[in-house]
Image (tube, helix red, strand yellow):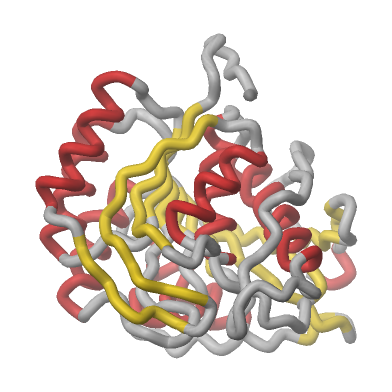
Amino acid sequence: MFKTTAGHIARMLTIAGSDSGGGAGIQADLKTAHQFAVYGMSAITAITAQNTLGVQGVFPLSPDAILQQLRSIADDLGFDAVKTGMLGDAAAIYTIASFLTERATCPIVVDPVMVAKGGTPLLDPADVQAVIEHLLPVATIITPNAPEASALTGIDVQSLAECKAAAVRIAEHGPQMVVVKGGHIATDIAERELSVDVVYANGRFTYFAAPRLQTAKTHGTGCTFSSAIASCLARGMEPLAAIASAKAFIHRAILEARNWDVGHGHGPTDHSVQPVFTTNIAPGMFYLFDGEQWLERNDIA
């Protein structure tokens, strides 16, 4: 396990739902934390009956049950970074946001889980508004995909330009850094089909791109990406470097799982791949991952 500069084991807390299929939710988060040599802890918000074909049932925990888990962890174990995923209804969201405001003195990564991979809605409009009003103001980094960015802003996010517009609008609600993931939008840059994530902070855009992988093995990618960011932050990495390392990790995880025979739908990714730790990342640039390292690409920015 990795030790921080303060001399203790790096710790990451995930606040999210449980995926019975093992590919997403806290299962994906804890596998990811372990792969980054970070000690993972969890506060479960809901139990789902779920597999690669979809979500068959969601059984939310009460706000009190969630809060007791959070207090148990904070009172003894502590944490160096927090990641939130599927949170439940507005009451649970408010409870979690209040706890983080009172007890968290570390980076908070918000993955605004709103729709399951198969298209099942996980939040109603009142719950989305609770995310905007209570959770976004405490977020260090928020990582919506295109549909989630659309739900948070009202912008129909279908292009890089709309990713940028949505990122700016989301930032107005308080997150220090916004990452709008480009996996759901078609982007052809410099004659290469790329998945481009748009990062916005302090009035500047930074871009992280990787070759788009044609595969159905994408269950839990958002959970894995956000927990990888949180794990890197728990290790003390700078935010942009953490995002780059997480993007490289999820690219490798999808790539290595392409031939897996786990499930009959959107299969899971391979959480056993090795992380690529990145440090030399400057804001305002376009970076392309070649499978081994990040390359600065001014010609396609």
Q: Is residue 184 visible?
A: no
Image location (x, y in percent) of residue 246: 65, 51
Q: Residue at 58%, 60% (x, y): give it.
A: 199
Image location (x, y in percent) of residue 67: 17, 42
Against 105, is 41 above or below?
A: below
Tell me: 130 left or right of 206. left
Image location (x, y in percent) of residue 42: 37, 42
Q: Quadrant of residue 296?
A: bottom right
Tell me: 297 left or right of 175. right
Q: Residue at 61%, 77% (x, y): give it.
A: 263
Q: Residue at 11%, 59% (x, y): give it.
A: 91
Image location (x, y in percent) of residue 105: 34, 28
Q: Is residue 219 visible?
A: yes
Q: Quadrant of residue 218?
A: bottom right
Closest to the observer: 259 or 4? 259
Against 210, is 35 above or below?
A: above
Q: Residue at 31%, 44% (x, y): give it.
A: 43
Residue most toward the top?
Answer: 7
Against 6, is 67 above or below?
A: below
Count the labels in the image: 0
Closest to the observer: 105 or 59? 59
Closest to the observer: 280 or 184? 184
